[in-house]
Image (cartoon, grey):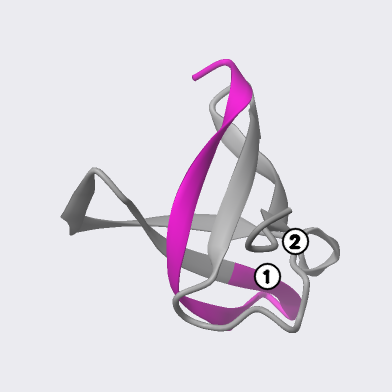
Amino acid sequence: MLRGSREVILRKVQPISVHGQISWDVHFIDPDDPDHVSVARVGPETVNHTLEPGDRLRLDYAMGAVVAVHRLVPGA
């Protein structure tokens, strides 16, 4: 996907240090394919640190990379 967004379900968020720079691995599934877990590595400014497994998210993409992670509020 060059540019757009998609809704997913969060499995886990894991901080990772690469050469001293903290990033976050966001593990998620597509609701239509729950057997396949995907991972997006993003900067800490991209992730709301109150995310919990099972949260519904909207991932925004640009040039095939996740550039924003938004928690979707049920009923909103």
The magenta stretch is 1-24
Whether residue 4 appears in magenta in the rendering, the answer is: yes
Question: Quadrant location of residue 11?
Answer: bottom left
Residue at 59%, 80% in the rendered image: 16
Mark closest to the chain's N terminus, 1 or 2: 1
Residue at 63%, 63% in the rendered image: 74
Residue underneath mark 1: 23
From this viewpoint, which residue is outermost toward the front? 75
Between the C-alphas of marks 1 and 2, the distance is 5 Å
- Going by the image, does 73 lie left or right of 55? right
Q: Nearer the viewer, residue 46 or 9?
A: 9
Q: Nearer the viewer, residue 71 or 37?
A: 71
Disc 1 element = strand
Q: Could you tell me the amino acid type at mark 1?
A: Ser
- Going by the image, does 23 lie left or right of 13? right
Question: Quadrant location of residue 69?
Answer: bottom right
Q: Nearer the viewer, residue 61 or 50?
A: 50
From this viewpoint, which residue is outermost toward the left? 35
Q: Could you tell me the amino acid type at mark 2?
A: Gly
Whether residue 58 appears in magenta in the rendering, the answer is: no
Disc 2 element = loop
Total marks placed: 2
From this viewpoint, which residue is outermost toward the right? 45
Q: Is residue 64 above or below residue 39?
A: above
Tell me residue 8's x, y (percent): 45, 51
- Going by the image, does 38 lie left or right of 75? left
Residue underneath mark 2: 43
Mark 2 residue crowding within 10 angstroms, few (<14) / some (14–19) / many (20+): some
Q: Badges 1 and 2: C-beta atoms under 8 Å apart?
A: yes
